[in-house]
Every structure is written in structure tokens, then in C-alpha cells.
Image: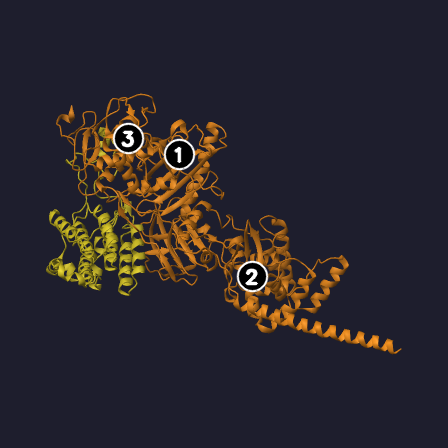
Chain colours: A orange, B yellow
């Protein structure tokens, strides 16, 4: 008996000890949980990926717009065409009159306030602009399009919103669907849990969560996504703790920004702010109730109710949310029916990552100045130079050219292509196409691949010749067969593309017709090293070994580098590094870095200008004349084709109006293609140039260059009233002759 | 004004420790001149269908001239075929007097600036006076930013103006002067060199750019280069 009592006492003691230990453990756990909750909540800074913006569209009187450009840009920005403009984000375009309610934006240098504006257009230009009070405006900057972000390794992205930013009815809708007792409960809702437990027991597994918003937040915020019992056990006390420490509004605001609402590839869409941009292309506060209802409905299962993949299912869910609102008398039945009939109104274009090749370039430039963490965490705002209209046209030009090439030459599986477009005057990169599919984020052929440039090098020979002061455009060059002994004892015999030699030709003709022999001779007389030095100065800096075949482009450059070289040629020999980023600001708008316009004289301006005119002859008469199948006749096309041995590479680089562009085509494995520079790259190039606003040169003829009428056959300047070719000359000129040189 | 300028140019090398100060004053004077421009204000790219005959140079040089085309190129052509355009008068003392030394246009001067040169458009080509007004506005905003001690904002405004009017020497003149004031003499010189290629129609800026190059070189302690640049000023056609 005594033994039994002792045993019982021991059991009791053990029991109490166990209870004490458990209580202590529980207490420790609670303290730990409390610390966790407070630490994470208070110390939490969301990692905000850097936002990358396109250049803003600037409107001013005289601004040229390509046909369709304005509407395209407004749609990209999520503006809606309406009959009466009442709210930010709306516009009406009728009879050349644009009414627009801008949203305003905080730029690096100033803030633009959103307001209602009137823009009058005429013949593809902005004629005048007026503000709300009818005052004349000189300059309007629309907000820039967000083109992507630089994400941290966990690929979370969000657009922070505050309670004050929300459209009316948003919170009411959210609470009606997700947590009606939110403002009453203590973080958990016993009735909700009971209901869920019954459902779970019935199903024999976890099928329903009785989670409050607070619990959902805890789940997202502190715990991993797995539905385990242990997680479930922690969730409730943590929700209680969270509720006890913070106000309902604080918790709600964090919830709004944390909730997971979809997945785009590797990128996770967090928060209603970003979801609004992602699904509707609009800021959250511009959403209509049926759009809000869709987002709220998606909380239950962002993948299951994904409106892009399962539009019908998402619509049903949205309509259910709307009927809940009607049941709660938040909207009338009539309103509900009207809203339920609305289409989903998803944005027609995916908002992000459409410009992978361009973003590669942005990252490349930013990595020089910023740490990877700063880029992915600090919410930096990066203002780039990309021109969404030009990029769109570049993508189309590439696509259409490939369709055409396929028709003509059959499927070219291995054929790849790249394009770089820049602003002629300041070197800002406006568009990059990194491969034949444009939107595919694979190997970037514009940046990461260097190929032989072929005849693209000839203009550099001519520039060197013109700058030497020993040659002018009518200087006679010998195109007769040539044999050059090599260092290894062999000989090199450059040949022309047509296999012929053309005797003595004027210098400009050697470029226009791309005669190899005459140009090699010219280059040899100048010195291969001098030509390569000039090439380096123009922007392709490299320690080039000087051997004769370099003169025919036996050297490899990426399309980006080639564009850099032609950029310098096109701006009178002034090198401006191709630039991608204009400014970087902090999340609050404070300027961090400004990338200034840089310029360095890299060649003689007179020689460069004369060369430009020579390149224009290539467009009018020479290997580039195919461009005029697409480009208007009044437009100047100045550039050079390049075709490498066995047609392995097809190039065209040149400028027109205010744009410089380079296109490359070639097989991935550098095997022969059916394309020459003219039949391949030039097609893409000219399709693009035909779609860009064209603005001719105004004042870039350097002093000391004059135009003369010439008789090229005789190689003399003739009287201005004779018929002949007008050519520019600097100090060195051919002799003048009367009788029109005859 | 001109005297002041000469005086500054002739500062002996011994003043070099204070050379930033002198460069600033000098650039300010130049900038003032630039802001006013020649009495005949330099035009910002006039895109209204030109009232001038189409220059040969504006087109592609292709034209193997047939008789029909000869009409387009406005024959009979002088030899050399000259670019048309207004010759601005040389720097106008009166307009300079309206400027404060640091290059800010006084209200008085400002009202006489851009508007007076707006080309009269005929109804058939009722296009706006191109981008001239917006460029003027941006230059003023740049001045304001500079006066507020925000050179970075001023540079952004000037770059914005450059994007709109990329071949307008006035914009390069302001940028170059601003960089020199900021002590970035090399950059200022390169901008002035670029500007020099754009002055065919506005020779008054040739004077400005060479003087600015001289000032930049002085700032860099390159006395010989400075003298060479000044010699170029003297060679300019008057």
C-alpha cells in the first residue's frame, strides 16, 4: 500500500515536473515567438528590387511623333481611352486633339504634377499644348514606363502601397471576403477555426484554413508555406502576439504588401500594388470595383484563379466576390449584375521583362557602380534611355524580316540576329534586340557575341584617308589585282565580291560599290596600324595586331561595339560612349547618380562629315540602296553593308535622321548563310528606320567643308550649273575645270 | 564688356593660383554673351518648311543632277555651294548689357529673347516655331538651377535641351561653360570642340567656343594651348 502510495507520489511528482518543464518550455517558446514577431515586424524592410524605367515621352511644340506612337505609349502606360476624361490615367484622342489626365511623376530633377492637358497635333507633330487653366505649356513629360526590375535571388517583387492609396471600397471588399471580423477579433477567430476543423476532420486532411488576415500574414511573413501541424500550432499564438503589439491598420497595411498574388516565371508577385500593375497595367488607386474584386478573389488561390491562365475560373471567382458584396448590401443587385458583366480587362501586354536584351545592358552598366544587394533591395529607381516605341518597332522589324526570309530561303533554324539602335547625337541606346525572337532572355547576340565585321571596316579606312589630308572623294584608287606578301612567306590576294577588278576608280566609288582591292590598297598606303588606331579611337579600343586582312574586316566585334564605332562616325567624329542609364535615384526620389553626356573628339570633324556624305552615297547608289524599298525617298540613309567570307555574317550599320542602328545576322555556329549584308541585315535596318520619326540634319556641316559640283569620271570640280555629282571637300580639292569637265 | 573680357584674358600666369576664380569670371562673361547670343538670336532648329532654298548639303549627296533635280538644289548654284542661313551679327553690346555677369538673363532681356525670332508661319505650313521655345525654357531652368547651387540639375536640364535640339550650338555653349565653372575643364573643352562643328550658320559661336577652349586650357595650366586657341579666335572671319 505504502509502495503504491510512493509510486503514486512519484507519478504525481513526475507529472508536476513535466508540467513545469512544459510550462517553462512554453514560456520560453512564447518569449522567443514574441521576439520573433516583434523583430520581424518592426525590423522588416522589404527588399525592394530596383525599378527600371524607360525614357519618359516628352511632348513639346514641334515634337515629331510617328504614326500610332502616341496611342501606343499611352497604352503602355496603362492609360484608358474614354469619352470624357475625368480621372488620372484617362485620355481621349479625336481629330488631332488629345485630352489627357496625367498621373504625375517624381523625376530625378523635378516633380510633374498630374493634371488635365490638351495637346493639339498636326501632321505628325505636336502643334500646341495647354494646361487645365488654358495656359500655354512648353513641355510635358509623361510618366516613364516601368520596364522591369532588378530582383534579388529570392525573386520577390512588390510595389508598396499605403492604406491611403487604396481605391474606395477596397478594404471593405477584402474584409468581406477574407475576414469579416477583422477589426473585432484578437488575431485569431475561434469560430473560424472551429468551422475549419469540422471541415478538415470530415475530409480527413487539411482542406480549409480558418485563418484570419493576421494569421495569413503570419503564415506568409514568418513561416514557410507547408501546411504542417507544427506550423498551424505556431500560427495562432504568433497571430495573437502580433495583434497585441500592433494596431489593426498597421497589420493590414503590411498584409496588403505581403500577400502573394501570382508568379511570373521566376518572379513572385507580392502585394496588391504590384498585382494591379501586373494584371491591369494600372496603379491600384485607378482600379474599378470589378478589378478590385478580382484581385481580392485571387487571394484564396493565386495560381488556381490566375486570370491569365484560367480566365473563366477567375471570372467566376470575381463574380462570387461581387455577389458577396451585394449580399452585404455594399452594392445593389443592379450594380452587381452590371459589374459581373464586365470583361476581366487584363492588360493586353505583359508589363515586365519584355526587353530582356536591353535589361542585360542596364545591369551591365549598373554593376559597375552599385553592389548587387543595393540594386535588389533598396528600391532604387533607374531611369534608362530605352525608347519603348523604337524598341517595339525594332522587335517588329526583326520579326517581319524573319517571316520574309523564311519565305525566301526556307526555314533557317540556326540563323540568329541582333540589333542595336542609338540616338545619333548623344549615344543614348534606344533599343536592343538580343536574338531573333526578341523577347527571349537567352544568349544576347547584341552584347555577348563578337563576329567578323567584313566591309564595315571600309569607312574607317576612308576616314583615315580623308583625315590624312592626302585624299579627297575623287582621289583615284587602283582596283587592279593585288598581291601582298605575308610575314610567313605566303601571299595574300584580296578579291572583289564580283570577282572582277575595276581599274582606276574615284575613292567614293570604291566605298559605294565596296571594292575590296582598291580599299586594301588605300589602307596599305595609309598603314594598317593607322587604320586600326582610328578604329580604336572611334570606340572599338583593342590592341589590334596590324595585318593586311584586317582592312577587309578580319576582326571581330559585337553589334554593340560596331554601333559605337558608327555612332562616332555619325556625330562628326565625336565619340560619346553608348549610354543606357540617365539617372539613378533612391526610392524617395533623391538623386544618387547622374550619368552625364560625355564627348571626346575621336576623328577630324571635317573628315567625318565628308565620310557621312560618302556613306549617304552608299545608301543612294551603292550596296545600301535596297533600304529605299522601305524608307521614304526624302530620308537620308547613310551606312555600310558588311558580308564576311562565305556569307557567314550579314551586317548593316549606319544612320538616318537622328538614329544610328546596327543589325547583324548570322548562324549560331558561324556556318555560311544565304544572306549578304544587303539581303539580310539591311532589311531589318530599313524596316526599322522607316517607322521612326525622321529629322534631317540642320547644322552639322563643320566650317571649312564646302560642296562642289563635280564630274567624277574626269575627277574635277565643274561649274555649278553643269550636271554632275555634288560632293563635299575640305581643304584638299580636285582641280576645277570649265565646260563641265568635258 | 568686351574690355572686361580682354582684361581677363590677359591675366598673367602668376595669377594662376586664382585661376579658377578668373576662369569662373571669364566663363560667366562668356556665358552672358552666349545667353544673349548674337543680336540676331541663333535659331533653334527651325522645322517649319524652310523658307530658305533647300541647301544641297541637307539632302543626301547622291544627286547625279538631272535637270529636274537641279531645280531642287536651287540652281544656279554658287561655287562653293553655300549653306544658306542667316548670318548673325556679332555680339551685340546692348544685349550684353542686359545680362548679369554670371550669365543670367535679366527679365528685361528675356522678354526680348525668344519671341522676337519666332518665324512667321504661313497658313499652309502652320507648324509651330519648332522646339525653340522649349529649349529656351530649359536653358532658363538650367540657369535657375545653377543659381540655386544645383549644377547637377542644371546639367540635366541642358541635356534635356540637347536631346530636343541636338545641333544647336547654344546648348553646347551652356554645357561647356557650366562644366568649366564646375572645374571640369577637359570635359568643357571637348564640348566646345563639338560645338565648333555646329557653328556654320552661327559663326558668332565660333568666337565663344574658341575662347572657352582657351579658358579651359588655362585652367589646366596649358599656356601654349591657350595661346593657340586665342590665335584661332583672331583667325575667325569677322
Q: Which mark is residue A511?
A: 3
Q: Residue at x 26, y 55 (%)?
A: B175
Question: What is the chain identity of the residue bearing mark 2?
Answer: A
Question: What is the chain identity of the residue bearing mark 3?
Answer: A
Q: Which residue is mark 2?
A: A258
Q: What is the CA distance from the residue labelled 3 to the residue labelled 2?
A: 62 Å
Any part of residue A631 in sight: no
Local packing at callout 3 (Cα closer than 10 Å; few below 14, some 14-19, many 20+) is: many
Q: Is residue A87 above or below residue A672?
A: below
Q: What is the CA distance from the residue labelled 2 to the residue labelled 1?
A: 47 Å
Position of A110 compared to A241: left or right?
A: left
**Residue at the outermost right position:** A1
Q: Earlier in the sequence, mark 3 or mark 2?
A: 2
**Foreground of the two, A730 or A4:** A4
Q: Which mark is residue A681?
A: 1
Q: Is residue A466 above or below residue B129?
A: above
Disc 2 + disc 1, Cβ < 8 Å: no
| Label 2 secondary element | helix
Q: Position of residue A507 (x, y in %)?
A: 24, 29
Q: What is the CA distance from the residue labelled 3 to the residue labelled 1?
A: 18 Å
Q: Position of residue A255 (x, y in %)?
A: 57, 64
Q: Is residue A269 above or below residue A507?
A: below
Position of A434 compared to A526: left or right?
A: right
Q: Earlier in the sequence, mark 3 or mark 1?
A: 3
| Label 3 secondary element | helix
Q: Earlier in the sequence, mark 2 or mark 1?
A: 2
Question: What is the chain identity of the residue bearing mark 1?
Answer: A
Amino acid at each position: 500500500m505504502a509502495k503504491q502510495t510512493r509510486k503514486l507520489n512519484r507519478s504525481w511528482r513526475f507529472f508536476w515536473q513535466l508540467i513545469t518543464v512544459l510550462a517553462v518550455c512554453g514560456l520560453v517558446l512564447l518569449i522567443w515567438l514574441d521576439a520573433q514577431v516583434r523583430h520581424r515586424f518592426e525590423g522588416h524592410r522589404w527588399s525592394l528590387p530596383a525599378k527600371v524605367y524607360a525614357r519618359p515621352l516628352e511632348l513639346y511644340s514641334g515634337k515629331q511623333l510617328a504614326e500610332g506612337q502616341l496611342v501606343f505609349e499611352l497604352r503602355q502606360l496603362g492609360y484608358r481611352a474614354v469619352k470624357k476624361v475625368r480621372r488620372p490615367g484617362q485620355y481621349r484622342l479625336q481629330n488631332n486633339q488629345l485630352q489627357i489626365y496625367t498621373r504625375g511623376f517624381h523625376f530625378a530633377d523635378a516633380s510633374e504634377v498630374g493634371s488635365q492637358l490638351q495637346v493639339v497635333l498636326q501632321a505628325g507633330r505636336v502643334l500646341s499644348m495647354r494646361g487645365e487653366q488654358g495656359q500655354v505649356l512648353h513641355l510635358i513629360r509623361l510618366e516613364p514606363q516601368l520596364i522591369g526590375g532588378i530582383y534579388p535571388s529570392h525573386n520577390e517583387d512588390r510595389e508598396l502601397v499605403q492604406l491611403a492609396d487604396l481605391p474606395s471600397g477596397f478594404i471593405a471588399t477584402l474584409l468581406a471576403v477574407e475576414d469579416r471580423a477583422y477589426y473585432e477579433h484578437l488575431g485569431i477567430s475561434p469560430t473560424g477555426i472551429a468551422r475549419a476543423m469540422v471541415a478538415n476532420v470530415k475530409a480527413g486532411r487539411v482542406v480549409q484554413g480558418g485563418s484570419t488576415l493576421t494569421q495569413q500574414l503570419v503564415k506568409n511573413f514568418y513561416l514557410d508555406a507547408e501546411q504542417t501541424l507544427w506550423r498551424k500550432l505556431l500560427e495562432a499564438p504568433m497571430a495573437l502576439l502580433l495583434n497585441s503589439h500592433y494596431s489593426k491598420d498597421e497589420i493590414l497595411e503590411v498584409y496588403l504588401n505581403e500577400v502573394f498574388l501570382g508568379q511570373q516565371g521566376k518572379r513572385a508577385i507580392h502585394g496588391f500594388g504590384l498585382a494591379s500593375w501586373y494584371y491591369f497595367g494600372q496603379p491600384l488607386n485607378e482600379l474599378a470595383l470589378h478589378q478590385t474584386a478580382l484581385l481580392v478573389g485571387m487571394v484564396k488561390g493565386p495560381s488556381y484563379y490566375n486570370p491569365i491562365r484560367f480566365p473563366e475560373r477567375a471570372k467566376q471567382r470575381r463574380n462570387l466576390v461581387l455577389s458577396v458584396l451585394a449580399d452585404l448590401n455594399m452594392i445593389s443587385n443592379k450594380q452587381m449584375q452590371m459589374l459581373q458583366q464586365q470583361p476581366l480587362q487584363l492588360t493586353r501586354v505583359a508589363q515586365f521583362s519584355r526587353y530582356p536584351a536591353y535589361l542585360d545592358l542596364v545591369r551591365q552598366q549598373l554593376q559597375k557602380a552599385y553592389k548587387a544587394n543595393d540594386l535588389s533591395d533598396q528600391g532604387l529607381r533607374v531611369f534608362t534611355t530605352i525608347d519603348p516605341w523604337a524598341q517595339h518597332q525594332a522587335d517588329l522589324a526583326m520579326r517581319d524580316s524573319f517571316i520574309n526570309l523564311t519565305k525566301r530561303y526556307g526555314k533557317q533554324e540556326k540563323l540568329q540576329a541582333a540589333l542595336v539602335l542609338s540616338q545619333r547625337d548623344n549615344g543614348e541606346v534606344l533599343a536592343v534586340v538580343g536574338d531573333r525572337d526578341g523577347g527571349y532572355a537567352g544568349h544576347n547576340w547584341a552584347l555577348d557575341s563578337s563576329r567578323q565585321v567584313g566591309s564595315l571596316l571600309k569607312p574607317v579606312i576612308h576616314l583615315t584617308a580623308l583625315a590624312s589630308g592626302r585624299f579627297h572623294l575623287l582621289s583615284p584608287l587602283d582596283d587592279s589585282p593585288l598581291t601582298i606578301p605575308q610575314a610567313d612567306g605566303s601571299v595574300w590576294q584580296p578579291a572583289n565580291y564580283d570577282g572582277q577588278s575595276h581599274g582606276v576608280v574615284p575613292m567614293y566609288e570604291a566605298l559605294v560599290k565596296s571594292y575590296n582591292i582598291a580599299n586594301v590598297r588605300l589602307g596599305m598606303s595609309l598603314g594598317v596600324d593607322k587604320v586600326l588606331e582610328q578604329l580604336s579611337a572611334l570606340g572599338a579600343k583593342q590592341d589590334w595586331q596590324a595585318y593586311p586582312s584586317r582592312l577587309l574586316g578580319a576582326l571581330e566585334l559585337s553589334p554593340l561595339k560596331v554601333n559605337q564605332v558608327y555612332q562616332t562616325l555619325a556625330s562628326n567624329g565625336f565619340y560619346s560612349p553608348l549610354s543606357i542609364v540617365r539617372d539613378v535615384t533612391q526610392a524617395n526620389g533623391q538623386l544618387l547618380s547622374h550619368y552625364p553626356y560625355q564627348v571626346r573628339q575621336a576623328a577630324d570633324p571635317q573628315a567625318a562629315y565628308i565620310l557621312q556624305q560618302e556613306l549617304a552615297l552608299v545608301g543612294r547608289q551603292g550596296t545600301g540602296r535596297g533600304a529605299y524599298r522601305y524608307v521614304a525617298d526624302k530620308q537620308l540613309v547613310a551606312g555600310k553593308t558588311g558580308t564576311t567570307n562565305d556569307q557567314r555574317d550579314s551586317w548593316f550599320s549606319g544612320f538616318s535622321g537622328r538614329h544610328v542602328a546596327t543589325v547583324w545576322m548570322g548562324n549560331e555556329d558561324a556556318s555560311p548563310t544565304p544572306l549578304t549584308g544587303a539581303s539580310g541585315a539591311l532589311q531589318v535596318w530599313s524596316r526599322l528606320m522607316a517607322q521612326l520619326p525622321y529629322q534631317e540634319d540642320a547644322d552639322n556641316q563643320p566650317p571649312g567643308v564646302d560642296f562642289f559640283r563635280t564630274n567624277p569620271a574626269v575627277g574635277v570640280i565643274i561649274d555649278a550649273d553643269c550636271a554632275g555629282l555634288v560632293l563635299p571637300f575640305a581643304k584638299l580639292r580636285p582641280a576645277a575645270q570649265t565646260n563641265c569637265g568635258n | 564688356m568686351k574690355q572686361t573680357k580682354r582684361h581677363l584674358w590677359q591675366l598673367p600666369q602668376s595669377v594662376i593660383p586664382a585661376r579658377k576664380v578668373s576662369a569662373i569670371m571669364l566663363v560667366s562673361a562668356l556665358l552672358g554673351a552666349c545667353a544673349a547670343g548674337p543680336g540676331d538670336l541663333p535659331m533653334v532648329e527651325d522645322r517649319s518648311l524652310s523658307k530658305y532654298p533647300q541647301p544641297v548639303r541637307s539632302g543626301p549627296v547622291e544627286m547625279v543632277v538631272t535637270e529636274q533635280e537641279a531645280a531642287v538644289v536651287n540652281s544656279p548654284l554658287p561655287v562653293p555651294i553655300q549653306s544658306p542661313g542667316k548670318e548673325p551679327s556679332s555680339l551685340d553690346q546692348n544685349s550684353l548689357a542686359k545680362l548679369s555677369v554670371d550669365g543670367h538673363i535679366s527679365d528685361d532681356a528675356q522678354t526680348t529673347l525668344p519671341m522676337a525670332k519666332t518665324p512667321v508661319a504661313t497658313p499652309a505650313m502652320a507648324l509651330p516655331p519648332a522646339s525653340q521655345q522649349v529649349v529656351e525654357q530649359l536653358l532658363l531652368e538650367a540657369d535657375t538651377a545653377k543659381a540655386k547651387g544645383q549644377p547637377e540639375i542644371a546639367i540635366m536640364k541642358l541635356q534635356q535641351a540637347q536631346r530636343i535640339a541636338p545641333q544647336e550650338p547654344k546648348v553646347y555653349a551652356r554645357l561647356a561653360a557650366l562644366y568649366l565653372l564646375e572645374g571640369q575643364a577637359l570635359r568643357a573643352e571637348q564640348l566646345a570642340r563639338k560645338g565648333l562643328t555646329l557653328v556654320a550658320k552661327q559663326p558668332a559661336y565660333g568666337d565663344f567656343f574658341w575662347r572657352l577652349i582657351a579658358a579651359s586650357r588655362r585652367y589646366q595650366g596649358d599656356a601654349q594651348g591657350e595661346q593657340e586657341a586665342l590665335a584661332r579666335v583672331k583667325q575667325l572671319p569677322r
